[in-house]
Image: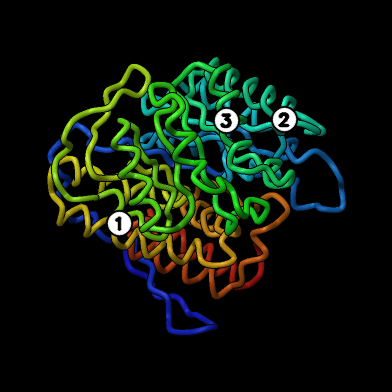
Amino acid sequence: MKIELPNPTGDPIWLEDGVLATEPEPEAAAPVRIAYAAAHIILEESYRDLSVPSDASEHVDWSRTMAFRQHLAQHGFGIAEAMDTAQRFELGWPAARRLIEECGALQLETGFIAGAGADQCQDVADLTTLIDAVVEQVGIIQSAGGIPIILPMPWLCHWGCDEGQFISTYRSIFEQCTGPLFIHWLGPMFLAELEGYFPGDSLRKILEIDADKVRGVKMSMLDHDLELEVRRHCRDRGQIVLTGDDFHFSALIEGDGKAPTGTVLLGDRQIPDGEFSHPLLGVFDGIAVPAGRALRHLAAGDLTGYQRWMDPCEAYGQKVFEAPTHLYKAGLAFTAWLNGHQPQPMLLNRIDLQRDQEHLLEVARLASLAGAIVDAGEAAEKIEFFLAGVDR
């Protein structure tokens, strides 16, 4: 089905469901990348009444939020839980812990990775408090069956810590934890407080502390060349890069286009290794159907099919993550609403209202071109409501 919609800010919008679905499914093959989708949270209608102050976690629609994670897993994705896409920095630790434990209870075959921070502390006054808090959360994630990823610690920037202090802090955390672990480099475009994170050569030196325990780094710097540089160093140590580059992910995942050259150990799994990044991306939240298809083409050795599916996904990501980048969750929630995964596109602190109509209509158009609109008729009806201001 193909539907034309009026666009008050430009050319008409065409929505089409399953735009690439006529293409034959690739032959089944073992995955050549591990892939995690960072998932957002879905709110109850009660959150619309901002005049009533209350704990935001009281307004999370837990059943829909978990059902959405199952949807992502059905298309081949592990879940990246309680991270920035889930508005971790606004949600608070009690709700983040519940996300982690409920995600673990799903026992998804694709597994999950989750952010370990220090937000259970009302006040992080010193390094000892910070280190102990992160170690505690690492243990909670592992008890739930997940792989911990150590979230950036903005306190290190607040305190003006130098290269040596960064290294000693991470070393102390590693010494008190069992693996596998990942670390996360999140850029200031997502959280301004992280300007200057990993000063000097601290990232490389931290990754060298215990390569058997620390299996790699998630790069969320939106810098293609920087990621290639880090990836080269990681491969020398048998570590991997999880790309968080929602602007350039297609080529980073494809890499040199060659078959994996070996495997690396991740917990009890041997995962493919080669000149490529494995994805851990918020953008997969909105494009799980076509991106999952693209990865199956890649597994089958069909680079043309991979590019045909993944490149339009990247165009969608570039729009969703355009500056101000931290508002990207609005495009993801809007897409999920169009596809019937949630009854409205609300987000914590109503950041969904900070993206204008023109932006969100373009998100819808690019989602359609990527093959991410499941039912064009249903999506068109919702866009008509949106244009009338019904769901804002």
Q: Is residue 94 visible?
A: no
Q: CA distance from mark 1 to mark 2?
A: 51 Å
Residue 296: mark in rendering: none
Q: Specify the amino acid type for callout 1.
A: Gly
Residue ID at (50%, 50%): 340
Q: Residue 170 got which mark?
A: 3
Task: Work out whether mark 3 precedes mark 2 in sequence or the reverse, and give the earlier one.
Answer: 2
**Residue 212 drawn at (x, y percent):** 38, 22
Location of residue 349 in the rendering, given as x and y in whole percent from the top left corner: 73, 53
Q: Mark 3, residues whose alpha carbon is within 10 Å: few (<14), some, or many (≥20)?
A: some
Name the disc covering residue 18, or none.
1
**Quadrant in the picture for the C terminus:** bottom right
The image quadrant of residue 329 is bottom right
| Of the pair 89 and 292, the residue shown nearer to us | 89
Q: Disc count in the image?
A: 3
Mark 1 is surrounded, within 10 Å at the Cα level, by few (under 14), some (14 to 19) or many (20 or more) other residues, namely many
C-alpha span from label 1 to label 3: 46 Å
Residue linked to disc 2? 127
Label 2: which secondary element? helix
Looking at the rendering, in which quadrant would you find the N terminus? bottom left
